Amino acid sequence: MGEDGFGGTLLDCLQTNGCLTDFMIQVPEWVTPTYLKPIHRGYEGVETEGPRFDIENKSAMDEAVETTVIDALRECIPLVDGVIVGDQMPIENLGVVTNRVREELCELGLAFPDKIFFSDSRTRIGKYRNVIIKPNRFEAKRAVQPEWSGQEVDIEEARQCAVALAEQTQRTVYVTLGENGILVYSEGEFTHIPGIPIDDEIDPVGAGDSVSAGLVATLCSLRTSQAEASIEAAYVGNLVASITVTKIGTTGTASPEEILQRHQDYVKL
């Protein structure tokens, strides 16, 4: 992250929440990627959401910084149960996950089979090997068929994409299906985890990250990514996302108590 205001705020927030920041790397020439979402308050307190405003880094990472990132990764792996890779920068090699860093992550996924390596990427999910991946149905389709320009991907197409991607990764593949839940392909078998019905107003921004958080936390707690654990993890991911999307105008979170309550409400349906 950069030695800028956003980077400093991020570091403070992480430390305030008890996160270990020993392996965070700050460099002066880097811009910490950030997005803002303006909320306009009108007459009688009516609020409307403005267009998202993104601040992105525009400079490629220096090779020496890349080496520092890779060294930090290697050093922290023995200390953690899992690694989540958020490869979301729209332009290749302008984020932390450069081609070189991605290759290292794929090698680490092979070298540490007892660790959970999990990646989410809007445009480069097809470049991962030896790690669990979680594309949505459109990302999966584009990874398998780059020339695709359609409008919808049905569940059968999602299945075909999951099989193709699993051949590359040799790991479980999760394909998210929006309100229809998650398709899990693990050890040659498919399981469809339905979405959690929601009656409240929702804001879907961040739903994918919520799924990732719940899913990976579950895999790490079970200390395995085998088929049964993969199914349970997808269900927890759905529960978490079904809570966070209902929190409008704020960063959605889901406490353990909220997750348990949502589970209890769901099984009663």
Image (cartoon, rainbow, N blue to C red):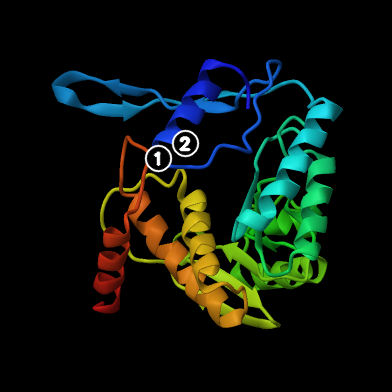
Q: Secondary structure at mark 1?
A: loop
Q: Residues within 10 Å of mark 1 (few under 14, many from 20)?
A: few
Position of residue 213 measured from the top left corner of the image (x, y, whole percent): 49, 55
Q: Please, what secondary structure does the residue beneath circle 2 have?
A: helix
Name above or below for residue 18 compared with residue 255: above
Q: Is residue 15 above or below residue 142?
A: above
Q: Which residue is mark 1?
A: 17
Residue 173 x %, y %: 66, 68
Instruction: Inspect the image, locate mark 1, and give the three-letter code of the amino acid beneath it.
Output: Asn
Front residue of 120 and 12 = 12
In three-dimensional space, the C-alpha distance between marks 1 and 2, rounded to whole angstroms, equals: 5 Å
In front of the other: 170 or 219: 219
Give the image location of residue 82, x and y in percent.
61, 59
Question: What residue is shown with label 2?
Answer: 14
Q: Amino acid at mark 2?
A: Leu
**Is residue 239 rendered to the left or right of residue 214?**
left
In front: 200, or 149? 200
Point 48% across, 75% down: residue: 232
